[in-house]
Structures are given as C-alpha cells and as structure tokens.
Amino acid sequence: MTKIAYPSRRGLANLDSGRYIDLEEEISNLPAYDPSKCPKGLIDLSGAVNKLMRDVMEEKIDSFAAQYAFGQAIDYGPVMGPPSLSKAVARFVNHHFKPATAVKSTEILVTNGASSMIDLVAFNLCDRGEGIMVLTPTYMMFKHDLCARTGIEFIGVSASVDDQFSARYAPQLVKVLENAIVESQRNKILVRALLICNPCNPVGRCYSKTTLTYLAQLCGRHSMHLIADEIYAMSCFASSSPPGLDEFSSVLSLPADPGNNVLAENIHCIYGASKDFGAGGLRLGFFITRNELVWKVCRRLALFTWVTCFSTAYFEHFLSDESAIAGYLGLYQERLRARYVQTTDLLRKHGIPFVPANSGIFLLVKLTRWLEFFNSSNPEKSAEEQLCRYLAYSGGVFISMGEVRAV
C-alpha cells in the first residue's frame, strides 16, 4: 500500500516549537489598517520594523537606481559581495563603533541578513547538544535562529538583578551567569558561548562598557565565545527619564587584556542593514570577528547565505558617502527621540507602565494588571496569549508577548 512520505523528526520538531510563529501567521490574515481604505484594520506593533527614515532611504535608493546598470543585478556576483563592500563596512564600524583596534575588511563576513548569520555562527561555534547562553529578556526569535537547524541547546538566563546593564550590578550579573554554567554542566550541556543583544531588544537599554568587560572576562575564564548582536547600535537617543542611562558601547571597543581573560579572538559582533537603516529588504548582515579560524569555518558555509549584487552595490554606495551618513544618523536619532517622547507621553496619559529606554525602535510595556481578566489555568493558551489575542481581535492592535521574550 502506498503511503504518504513524512518530513524528518527534526523538521516536525520545529512545528512544535513555533507557537508564536503560528500566531503571527494567523493574525497576519486580519485586514491591515489603512486610514482611508480600512480604518478599523489591524495595527501591527509586534515587530521592530523601522520606517522612521523611509522617506530619506527611498530618495537615496531611487537616486542610486537611476544610474545603476540593472543587468548586473541578475549576475551571481561574489558570495559575500565585492571586497569594496567589506572595506566600506570596516570604515563605518571604525568610525561609529570605536573599536579598541581598527577592524580590517578581512575580519568581516557578509551574509544575506542577520538571522541566517546567527544560524551560521551557531552551527560553527557549537556541536549538537552543546549550548549558547542568552541573557533575557531578549529578541524573541533568537531561540529559533540558534536552534532550528543546528540541534544546539538554548540556555535562557534571566538576569534577576536590579539593572543588568549598569556597571553597579555587573558582579551580580556575572554570578548569575556562573550559576547558569554550573547548572548546565549538571545537565551535561557544555556552554560554548554567551549571546547578548546590545542595545537590548526589547528593553531599549545598552550594556555599560564595564558590564561588557565583566562578560568578556567571564567568557575568557570558561573558554567561551562572547557574541553581541549590535544591530541597533546607531538607534540611540538622549533620554531624560531617568537620566544617566548608559550610552552604546560596542564589544569591539574592549581592549584585549589576556592577563584578565579578555581575548579579542573570543569576541564577535553582529551588525546589519535592517534596523538602523530600515533596509531589511536588502538582506545584508555583517559578522565581525578577530578569530581567523572562526571566520574561515563560517566562510566555508557562506554559499548558503549568498548576497545579491544590487544589495551590495547599493549599500556600498550608501556607506561610502560619509557626510551623508552623518546627516542621516543625526536626523534619524532626532526623529527617534521625538517618537519616543511622543509614545511615552501617551503611555503615561493612559496609565500604562513602561520601562524607560534610550535606544531601539521598541518599548517594553507592562500589562500585568490586565492579565487578571483572563483564565490563567487554560492549558491551551496562557493568560498572556489570551490578552494578546483580545487586543488583536477586539482592539485592533497586535503586540509581541513578553513570555516569548522570557520577560
């Protein structure tokens, strides 16, 4: 008797672990808000999509397209784009990330976006069954991006300190991570890396340079990699409430100090075009590492993350105009702060608590007191998911749940 052939067990396992992805797909079928055509449609606030500078980016890309020979766009092109792109990225990083030692273009790996890069890096830093620690709350798709194809273990670690970002609490934060490493060892899991989001999605805060140093020392003591997703590096703004929040410092700014367990070869940075520049459709991600062997093993699999000719040509052109970049970032950060002030004023007006921030294109709001109106004992859907669905179907607003970010 002929039978239908089934997918692999690992493929099916991803269906079980993708509950929030299923919810997103379900909600996406609702009609989207349009002020004239669909005024009662859904307003989707669930993703960090940056449209603040859409007018500027459209003007720049239209200008570039007018003189671009589009016949080149259908060529394969180099796997990681031309070397001139990596040189342009290196110049940008050296100017804006303030690395302790200048980044070389040969230390940059270019991929078709940060998500595929995270998968690529996880595959090459860990063997199946080994783990990567991730400080939470964090970007909700890290677990999927790290584990869906690699078979590694996601070790979420709640900071459980008053302020995981400030220098004051750095020793306590390291103690929490040390305990997580010990617990993982008890569970027969070798921790190979620590992944942080800096600036942090969804909290909107930056790790102090002192805290980054503590984390680098921790990784050095345990022969672990420190990976920083710094895709929101330029999405920072001055915040007056509360004052004194740490400004952005890149992990690349940490000077090598082997005597104190800070090894440049163990520290890696992820960046891309999607957030600061609102250009997710270009599908460009950059992995910056001083570890030659890590670069080589990742490069060997870059055939799976091939970039397009048009994307690389445009972004190289864009980054090469340093005065235009300076103007773009100045205007962007000005608009970002204005939008933050506007949003937080509205939240205060309506009595909705939130976590003060000074970076990112998102806000962490606290809707805990509204959960009491939903059935917390429902085995199918948590109270948080019920609230999320209520807001989408009855309120016309879709927001990301805290539980998928381990809040």
Image: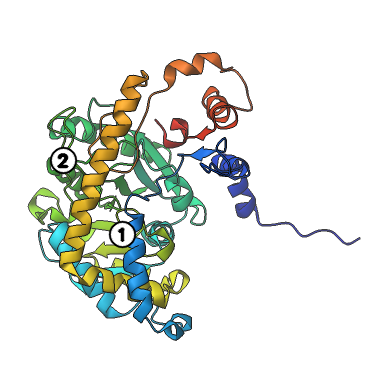
Residue 252 found in image quarter = bottom left
- Image coordinates of residue 7 in percent, x first then y, are 69, 57
Q: Earlier in the sequence, mark 2 or mark 1?
A: 1
* Amino acid at the residue labelled 1: Val
Most foreground residue, 152 or 24 = 24
Quarter of the rendering occupied by the C terminus: top left
Disc 2/disc 1 C-alpha distance (Å): 31 Å
Numbered mark located on residue 405 in the image: none
- Image coordinates of residue 209 in percent, x first then y, are 13, 44
Most foreground residue, 173 or 315 = 315
* Amino acid at the residue labelled 2: Ser
Q: Residue beneath label 2, please?
A: 208
User: Residue at the location (26% across, 63% down)?
Assistant: 288
The answer to whether one can see residue 354 in this image is no
User: Residue at the location (24% across, 63% down)?
Assistant: 289
User: Residue at the location (34% across, 76% down)?
Assistant: 313
**Is residue 224 positioned above or below 362 on the image?**
below
- Image coordinates of residue 406 in percent, x first then y, are 41, 33
Most foreground residue, 40 or 378 = 40
Q: Secondary structure at mark 2?
A: loop
Q: Residue beneath label 1, please?
A: 56
**Is residue 78 positioned above or below 46 on the image?**
below
Quarter of the rendering occupied by the N terminus: bottom right
The answer to whether one can see residue 116 in this image is yes
Most foreground residue, 97 or 333 = 333
Query: What is the residue that sits farthest to the right in this orientation?
Result: 1
Residue 357 found in image quarter = top left
Alpha-carbon neighbours of circle 1 within 10 Å: few (<14), some, or many (≥20)?
some
